[in-house]
Amino acid sequence: MTNSFTDYKNSDVFLMIGANPAENHPQVMRFAGIAAAKRGAKIIVVDPRFTKTAAKADIYAPIRPGTDIAFLYGIMNYAIENNLYFHDYVVNYTNASFLVSPEYGFSDGLFTGLTEKDGNFSYDTKTWQYQTDGANIKKDPTLQDPQCVFQILKRHVSRYDIKTVCNITGTPEDVYRKVCELYCSTGKPDKAGNLLYAMGITQHTYGGQNVRATAMLQLLLGNIGIAGGGVNAQRGESNVQGSTDQAMLYHYIPGYNPCPDVNTPTLKDYIEKQVPKTSYWSNRNKFIISMLKAWFGDKATAENDFCYGWLPKHTGKDHSHMAIFQAMAEGKIKGFFAWGQNPAVGGPLASRTRDALAKLDWMVGVDLFETETVSFWKRPGVNPADIKTEVFLLPTAMSYEKEGTVANSSRWIQWRWKAVEPPGEAKSDLWIADRIFKAIRKEYQAGGKFTDPILNMVWDYDVPGHDEPDIMKVGREMNGYLVADGSLLDSFAKLKEDGSTACGVWIYAGYMFVDPALKVPACQRRSREDKTGLGLFPKWSFAWPANRRIVYNRCSADPAGKPWDPAKTLVAWDGTQWITNDVPDFGFKDANTGAFIPPNISASNCFIMNTEGVGRLFAPTGMKDGPLPEHYEPIESPVKNLISKQQNNPVAARYKGDFAKVAHTASPEFPYIATTHRLVEHYQSGAVTRNCPTLAEFMPEMFATISPGLAKKLGVKPGDLIVVSTVRGEITCKANVLPIVKPLKVNGSEIEIVGLPWHWGYQGLAPGSTANDLTPFVGDPNTMIPEYKAFLCNVKKASGH
Amino acid sequence: MRKLSRRDFLRYLGLGTAGTALLEGVSAVPALASTAEDKLPSFDMGPVKIKKAKETPSVCAFCGCGCGLIVYSEGDRVIHIEGDPDNPNNEGSMCCKGIALGEANTIVDPKRKRTLNKQRVTEVLYRAPGSSKWEKKSWDWALAEIAKRVKKTRDESFEERDDKGIPVNRTQAIAHLGSASVDNEENYIMHKMLRALGVVNIDHHARL
């Protein structure tokens, strides 16, 4: 999230799209309620289902799953046509005035540069680049040049007029018009629009472009970097922000530095290709060298490239969840750690996922409960004797049976203290990881393949007399320290590329630094001090980066440094110095002299992580499927694309064999749209909550929600057993007949929607059928996130019922 | 007598989370007349049993809101969980799922006694190839056996160079998933371990 939950009280209008916070992020509703009571904030909810969140909306806009780009573009088109966008913000803080190559073009759903090789499509981004004059990008601040970003965007979104949008999305036109009017009211200096989303936006074959569309709308309305605004991705697990920060992902190493791959076999290659000349990422060499110092200690020297050669280099291709299970099914993966994760319920096409597990030689499961994944060998319908996989199940500790930090959706890294001992033989995940690595290292003491990184990795977390590793030692390594004396760093600004600093996770620099006044590490702070009253809470825990609570906050003030809305001042230039209510997200003070840097310098570099220094309404780099979003249909769709001949994202991630199965467009066998969702009583795959008696009793069984009209047509009464099928399989569950789903009128015809919660599997106190047995194995080309949110199904009354 | 903290005050009132907004003056939400402070019923209570419990500040293990909670425990059992009124994320309020978090450790059994949740895995378990049951094992055995499996698979599949001769130092035969359910420090050392081994097939909940 760019902002924080506690900042939501400053919002004037909420646009909740692809999110159901009343069930999945309940605190959002408390803060939205505060904003409504305190400042008369309005809430817009855009969702295929009339959710509990929608029940609290001022405007509820139904939408067909997978049509968010059309929905968001229609609002942008409305803002541009009616001159409701925030002109001064757009001119100064976005790339609206930048000129794009005359070679750039877009025609009938495709951008220039699409190339085909062996039946696979990809884009060459050469024609998407800016026009340059030497080192400078050419600009037209009047925004009139036909090749400037603003004009390109204006032409692109002009195709998304209200009638076209509503034909695609199924949203009633009168409702949609109200959404446009209300949300565009935030394009004023003293109004804040808060766009919040969750998996309803990301889980599509163009989920990355969905997110781009949310950011572009917020840029147009001047809603980024201000209190009460932002692009706020509600994150679904207590530490999914943190586990992403620590890079439990193939393509990163900690702190969002790309994982080395075959294109960067040496440190020199990495610095040439991954360290840009401009933006804050120009410091990336300091981040990676400091990480190598933290990992390899004295062994890492300038002469040996700080042991960069010891890091694995991935293939440059896809090693994500879906690619892993395809490789597993092909017998290419022999050993597997399922660590606090339950893909046998949570992954796409979970039935094939479970089959793939049987191809493993060994699996190590680390969990609190016997999940569907670790017990796949005794699942209903299989004979354990046929499954040769060895399985180790290691009992782990619950959150309050150990200590450590978790990063919430607001990027706040909060400390959890230990309340009770883990039961029986259960141990903390820290202990388990520590002991597994030590046991492996012991094996390699006698030799083996490429032992250097194993034998030399800094691994010094023991405390004499204690069984548990010292988590503070781990934390200090992540935080970073001076190699010379081990003193902790208070900021990543102190990191060096000469090997004199060590830092495991540069964005966490400062999180363990002891607060001089409160005398505790920053992440353990519990002060409710909030001098501005804006909900910044600068001394409650630590927010990465740099304890900054609202990122891009330079944009909260005009180019001269005067806040757009003085009532919500984050930073302000008073003529001689900066007033800093939040930690500035720009160069405001000279590091050497301490002199203040006047506002004109930072005005043109207000998005410090972007090489061009401003927000991108048009993305020359970074996206594999176009510099602008474009509406495509989900891979499985009941209708043809109404906006172009291009039915699907041409570069969507697709997989092979059993995993390739998808229904064709407007399939008569699968006439309804299915979408998965969650419930407040359960958590993800239900591994924990289906083992908690109260929650299992609250929400005991799997169901599918269908509209009263569909139920009548099928002869189904509430509670009847129904069979929900897709081209990939079928499940049986109870029918929940409620008008919270209603057929949508799409291009003149009515289309039914089926809602499927995905919390159930065959284990636990409350077993039930698994929605993900039905979901398609296709994904976004940038993120490889599966398309869980829109696919085709059929529904029948179960025979004999 | 020591000054009553806000939490003590809540506890004596027996208000729990419902009163938090009122006491904090969350201000934005005007209190209903019937719940205004001076109109609340008063209680003549003896010592509050929860007083005996150890109070530990924690953060909910479910969604990404980061609600603070107070874990009340007696010995090894969690006896109660409530929202932490000081934590700005939730100011004492909790959802139904968060308030039930203690059940991952402690449940009330049919005899109305607090016991460990019987569903918890509390022993190291092993399932041999083709077997239809788990066997109990020791940590020492399991760690040593896992290490042998990792070494065998890694060394058999290890690529020092790829087919173009580029040094890659990796294994593609081991995969790891997880976890958004464990702490930052735990993820960090897991990541270090995996990269030291040359594992490139790494993913977790963030993509699902």
Image (cartoon, helix red, strand yellow):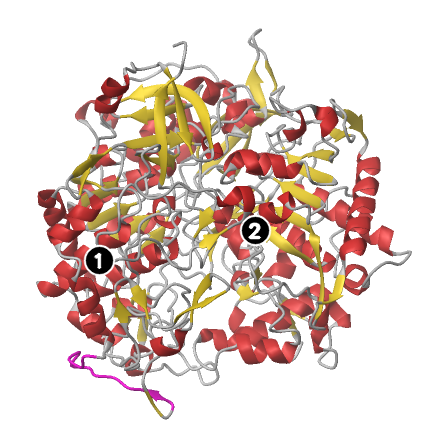
Q: Secondary structure at mark 1?
A: helix
Name the disc covering residue A73, or none: 1
Residue A586, how many percent across, how many down?
Answer: 38, 73
The residue labelled by disc 2 is A323
Residue A214, how many percent across, how many down?
Answer: 29, 56
Residue A242 among magenta residues:
no
Does residue A124 appear in the picture of this structure? yes
Left or right of A625? Residue A377 is right
**Mark 1, residues whose alpha carbon is within 10 Å: few (<14), some, or many (≥20)?**
many
Residue at 66% x, 73% y is A265
Residue at 77% x, 41% y is A467
Left or right of A23? Residue A286 is right
Does residue A486 appear in the picture of this structure? no
The quarter in which the N terminus of chain A is drawn is bottom left
Left or right of A173? Residue A780 is right
Residue A36, how many percent across, how many down?
Answer: 19, 42
Query: Separation of disc 1 and disc 2 at Cα?
Result: 32 Å
Camera-nearest residue between A448 and A419: A448
Rendered image quadrant of residue A485: bottom right
Residue B67, how many percent across, how many down?
Answer: 43, 39
| Magenta: main secondary structure | loop
The chain letter under disc 1 is A
Q: Which portion, as a residue range, is magenta?
A: A135-146
Q: Is residue B205 above or below residue A669?
A: below
